[in-house]
Amino acid sequence: MFRKALVAFGLLAACTPAAQAQITPRPEVLTGAFTPGFIGEADEKRYPIRTIRIGEVHISSGRLILADPFLMSTRNRPLTLTVPPGRYPVDLAVADAGESGQRVALARLLISDAPPVRWALAVTDEQDPTTLSGEDIFGYGVDAGTGAFVDAAVPAWLAGRYPPSDVDGYTALVDSWQVRGEAAAPGLGIPYGFALVEPLGPGGAAMFSSGWGDGYYASWVGYDADDHPVVIVTDFAVITAVNFPSAANSR
């Protein structure tokens, strides 16, 4: 985990040989998990998966930030890809983990209905996937059990609306997110979970529970036959959605 944290802050990637094998996505899982009747697997466990739509998020800037919404700030960098400004549906692939409850395995922001034909790691302009090897991956850290798709214009708007002198105002805002997100989740079929689509200044944020909770999570971008981005999927490591390189290729 320490190594992955270093990668997250860009402190390790430059030292890693580019020729070594990397984690690769499993397209049949990234797409299949959002189709009826899908069964996800992890180790020797099998989890029935269902899809719920939590709403549409407004992306006014055409740029996206992926982050824990309770930790995001103007330090968060947007993804390199751009999308037409507009409203985009957000779906959750929820795994029935039995006694462990209903867990958000994957979250997706649907840019287009076109089918993806290739997948690439979602990165910012400070992250180069060719510098990764073994089980290293770029993504974002979660420390409040929550992930999000956020309009890149939102952090600056929040910083202006709630300056450091207004700690109480910002605390009241995020407390209201927690209350409303937890209240909405049971109606969506994720009791004890969290889901909220919130308008924020010029754009918005779609927030949701992150798998088993806190961790470090990667996202993938699906591209269509014309090489346009059509979907962004965050993998919360509940089911096996990536292929890990063999130990021999990761040295």
Image (tube, grey):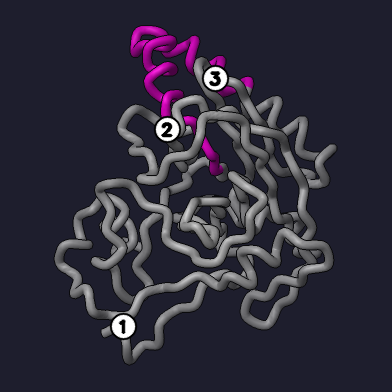
- Residue occupied by mark 1: 250
Query: Dividing the image into 4 quarters, which one contains the C terminus?
Result: bottom left
Instruction: Name which residue lies at 40% across and 87% down.
Output: 246
Q: Is residue 161 highlighted in magenta?
A: yes
**What's under tag 2, amino acid-wise?**
Met
Q: Residue 198: which numbered mark, if any?
A: none
Return the x and y of residue 213 as percentages of the image width and height.
57, 51
User: Which quarter of the figure has residue 45?
Assistant: bottom right
Q: Tell me if 137 is positioned left or right of 128 in this view.
A: right
Among numbered discs 1 and 2, the one appearing first in the sequence: 2
Asked which secondary structure carries label 3, the reply is: strand
Asked which secondary structure carries label 1, the reply is: loop
Residue 233 or residue 43, whichever sits in front: 233
Disc 3 crowd rating (10 Å Cα; few below 14, some 14-19, many 20+) is: some
Residue 87 in view here:
yes
What is the magenta segment's predominant secondary structure? helix
Q: Residue 200: which numbered mark, if any?
A: 3
* Residue that lies at the very extreme toward the bottom in this rendered image: 248
Residue 99 in view here:
no
Residues in magenta, as a range? 147-176
Instruction: Name which residue lies at 36% across and 75% down.
Output: 22
Among numbered discs 3 and 2, the one appearing first in the sequence: 2
Query: Dividing the image into 4 quarters, which one contains the N terminus?
Result: bottom left
- Residue occupied by mark 2: 72
Disc 2 crowd rating (10 Å Cα; few below 14, some 14-19, many 20+) is: some
**What's under tag 3, amino acid-wise?**
Leu
Instruction: Name which residue lies at 59% across and 72% down.
Output: 240
